[in-house]
Structures are given as C-alpha cells and as structure tokens.
Amino acid sequence: MKHETIEIQAGLGVAVLWLNRPDVRNAFNETMIAELTAAFGEVERDPEVRAVVLAGRGKVFCAGADLNWMKRMGELDFDENREDAMGFGTMLNRLHALKKPTIARVHGAAFAGGMGLIAACDIAVASTDTEFCVSEARLGLTPATISPYVLAAMGERAARRYFLTAERFPAAEAYRIGFVQELVQPAELDAMVNTILGELVQGAPGAHAATKELIRAVAKRPITPDLMADMAGRIASARASEEGKEGVRAFLEKRKPAWLQQAMKKGARKKK
C-alpha cells in the first residue's frame, strides 16, 4: 500500500513507521492522521511484527500540526472541529492501545501533537539535540487531545509549567522529568533503539499484550480487594496459557522459548 505522508519498513520482527513529510518538519495533517491510524491497525494485525518504532524523516521528529491544516480548522464550526479533533484523538489512542511494544525514536524537535505521539508510545528514546514544546497556549489553544498521554508521561507538576508557559525545553529536561527514558548522542540514537528492541523481542507476544493491558488497568488505582482479585485472575490466566507454560518449561529446561526460536529461524531465513 502506498502512502503520501508516512513510510513503513518491516523486517526481523520490527515495523518502523516513518513520519515522511520532512519538507514541513513532519507536521501532521488530516492525511497523515488517517494514514497513521490505518498503519497502526496494519501492524497490530501482522503476526510477524513484534515491536513498533515511530520515527521521523529529515531534521526533526514532528513539529506538530501543519499550518495550512490549522488554518482550515479555524474556518470550521464547533461540530466540525470536534469531529476533526476526534480523528486525531482516535489515532493517538490507537497507538497507545497497541498490543505490541512501541518505541518513539526522537530527534531534532517534538512540538505540540508531536509530543502526544511520543507520550502515546511505551518507550521514548531521544537524542541530546532535541527540543520539546507544548506550544498550544501561545496560539490561544489548549493541548486537550494530547493531555491524557503527556500528563501521564511527564507528571502533573511538570505539565503545569510546560502546558502554561509553552516554553521550549531541552532533551536533558525531558529526561529529568521522565518524559523520555533514554537520552543519547545523535550518532547513538539508532544503536540505543536497537538495544531496546533486542530486549523486547525476547518477551512473549501474548505476555506483552497482557502486560500492556495490565498497566492500563492498574495505573493510579487504589489497592483494594477487588484490584487484588483482578490481579490474581490475570496471573492465573497467564500461568494457564500455552505461552505461559512454554515460558516456564523453557526456563526450567534452560533453553530458549518457542517464540524466540521461531523469530531466530525467520531472521536466519531472511539473511540467506
């Protein structure tokens, strides 16, 4: 399938989704939103894909919304704007809810909606040259659509500052407040992403999906008898699953589990 605004590279169990509008700093418009939404569905359904990387072509990761698109949105009424915003929100939620691990490969700049994309990923790796900004307030707007994800990633206290000041802040600050988990020199960005991918593919696909659902279910919930019962049921299901049984057997027998053996065989065949 050909795309206008993104590029998909898949191999060795990994799908890399490139934002591919470098001439406008990978700013998103309605076409990119639609293509990303569809692409997240594609990689979700592809059993060969074990992990997903979101990256940007050119000098920056994503500069936020395309100015021409924003101008068109300004000419719409409330209901039309709400429908359009729901499209962007649906795309972010599709990324956030992917059953497969996701990594944001960040460089150059990540502004406004670009920060939403990063926050919707499970893991964020940034190069030291990256600038970040939640810029909406300076445009008379609010970061409403991205706020559930960015708030969870940076915390309420940091959000109070950066949502309100709309100031740019460096990668070191993004790392300090926990918005990104790894910070590396630009030349080391791909190596760090690959290192994390190497760790991710050792996990079981079903366990990854269940663990992501677990995190969403437990986050910020009080520890109550109902929660404890829910967690007991989840681990019981995992232990009773074929994947869980295989994982324990492989550990006890000191061998690689079936899902990792299969991935290694596929990788070897592709190299021939």
Image: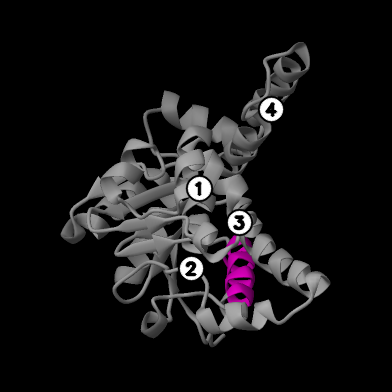
Disc assigned to residue 164: 1
Element under disc 2: loop
Residue at the image position 50 percent from the left and 61 percent from the top: 138
What's the magenta region?
Answer: 33-46
Residue in the foreground of this view, choosing between 269 and 127: 127
User: Which amino acid does the dot numbered 3 rest on?
Assistant: Thr
Image depth: mark 4 or mark 3 in front: 3
Image depth: mark 2 or mark 4 in front: 2
Element under disc 1: helix
Q: Is residue 49 visible?
A: no
Q: Residues within 10 Å of mark 1 (few under 14, many from 20)?
A: some
Disc assigned to residue 142: 3
Q: Which residue is mark 4?
A: 234
The earlier-in-sequence mark between 3 and 2 is 2
Q: Which residue is mark 2?
A: 64
Left or right of residue 56, residue 90 in this image? right
> What is the spatial separation of the Cα atoms under label 4 and label 3, in whole angstroms?
38 Å
The earlier-in-sequence mark between 1 and 3 is 3
Element under disc 4: helix
> What is the spatial separation of the Cα atoms under label 2 and label 4, in whole angstroms?
38 Å
